[in-house]
Amino acid sequence: MRWLAGLALGAAMTANIAQADPSIEVLAFSDLKGWADDDHQAALNVFLDTCPDMNDPDWASLCALATSQPDARTFFEVFFRPVLINGHEEALFTGYYEPELKGSRKRGGPYQHPLYRLPPEIEAGTPWATREEIEIENLLDGRGLEIAYIDDPVDVFFLQVQGSGRVALDDGDALRVGYAGKNGQEYRSIGQELIRRGVYEPHQVSAQVIKNWVRRNPEEGRALLHHNPSYVFFREVSEVPAHKGPLGAMNRSITPMRSIAIDPAFTTLGAPVWIEKGGAEPLNRLMIAQDTGSAIKGAQRADIYFGTGFEAGREAGKIKDKGRIVVLLPIQTAYVLIEG
């Protein structure tokens, strides 16, 4: 769903961590706040959604064991060890969701703002035109790359930030779009830019606040959106059933309040991750790392998936909390990292 898709599994993940030279500490399960009170079976069910795609032998063996439906808490405690990576850093938790936009297959009336397919000339990792150049110079017009037209350019921008979403079409039909690629430009936070300009204090910024400001200030708002040169392209993924979540970085549906986006340089995609989120509504829960995001950088950084639609978006937009992130790794992997 988010746009750094790819599997960083097993030995590759260990090599990445070693290169990053972080601090690593193996904890006991008794060190995890609220561990005994969680629904471990719910986490195991989500783990089973994506563990068959984890090709490292250690993970493949654990996935095979998980399919035999063991006692969930015992399974995690016997075969995993909690590993705290860069524990000297304070964690930052944010939330994300699957937007639901209004659109049309044809341009007309309020539906003027296209969602584009990936242009064939773009190569992964190679910088292409910036957001401003794409929009001001109309670089994609007339190429037949349009998937749908949306009624609000701000919604298009935030759909690109989220990486996927649903579109309710004006003919009564609907479609789902997912991440297909990007223009190779570095992501810049427009929320941070508003703070830098003195428009808001850090504690005031949320997705809804930013949307409202851009809509109230259309000219300045357009320039603000251009501050982020990154531009995301989409593909149709309407084959995913409506009752399932959008596709994450492992190309499997993600689960509200059990799936998180992480930095795969530090955390294996598919791994169980224990989070201890502070803030107004603390959350201690076993999640599964099934997604990534261009703004998710570092071992102590995670984005919690809240679900689809307006209410999920409102709840996700409130989250900007501190805490701690602990990865559950196979015993062999955990101790290889310590010895390394």
Image: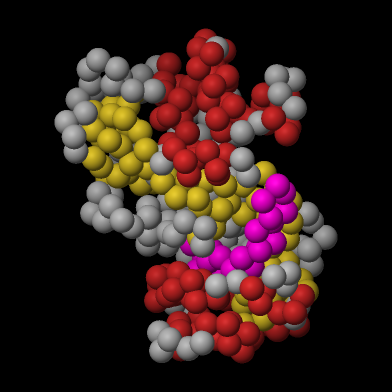
Q: In this view, does 333 lie to the left or right of 89?
A: left
Closest to the observer, 224 or 171? 171
Q: Position of residue 110 (x, y in %)?
A: 29, 17
Furthest-left residue in this view: 171
Closest to the observer, 235 or 90? 90
**Quick check: can you spot residue 125?**
no
Total of numbered circles in the picture?
0
Task: Identify which residue is drawn at 38% across, 59% down.
Answer: 253
When the figure is inspected, residue 304 is found, relative to residue 317, above or below; the finding is: below
Furthest-right residue in this view: 88
Magenta stretch mostly in which secondary structure? Answer: strand
122 drawn magenta: no
Q: Give the range drawn in magenta.
A: 268-292
When the figure is inspected, residue 81 is found, relative to residue 16, above or below; the finding is: below
**Quick check: can you spot residue 87?**
yes
276 drawn magenta: yes
Q: Where is residue 95 in the image (x, y as percent from the top left)?
A: 57, 47
Task: Identify which residue is drawn at 58% across, 57% down.
Answer: 262
Task: Identify which residue is drawn at 61% across, 61% down.
Answer: 265
When the figure is inspected, residue 158 is found, relative to residue 54, above or below; the finding is: above
Task: Identify which residue is drawn at 78% across, 63% down.
Answer: 87
When the figure is inspected, residue 319 is found, relative to residue 134, above or below; the finding is: below
Q: Where is residue 337 in the image (x, y as percent from the top left)?
A: 70, 77
Closest to the observer, 153 or 120? 153
**Placement of the C terminus among the 4 image quadrants:** bottom right
Q: In this view, does 317 lie to the left or right of 101?
A: right
Give the color scheme: rainbow, by chain, secondary structure or one colour: secondary structure
Q: Where is residue 205 in the image (x, y as percent from the top left)?
A: 66, 31
Q: In this view, does 258 lie to the left or right of 17?
A: left
Quarter of the image where one finds residue 54: bottom left
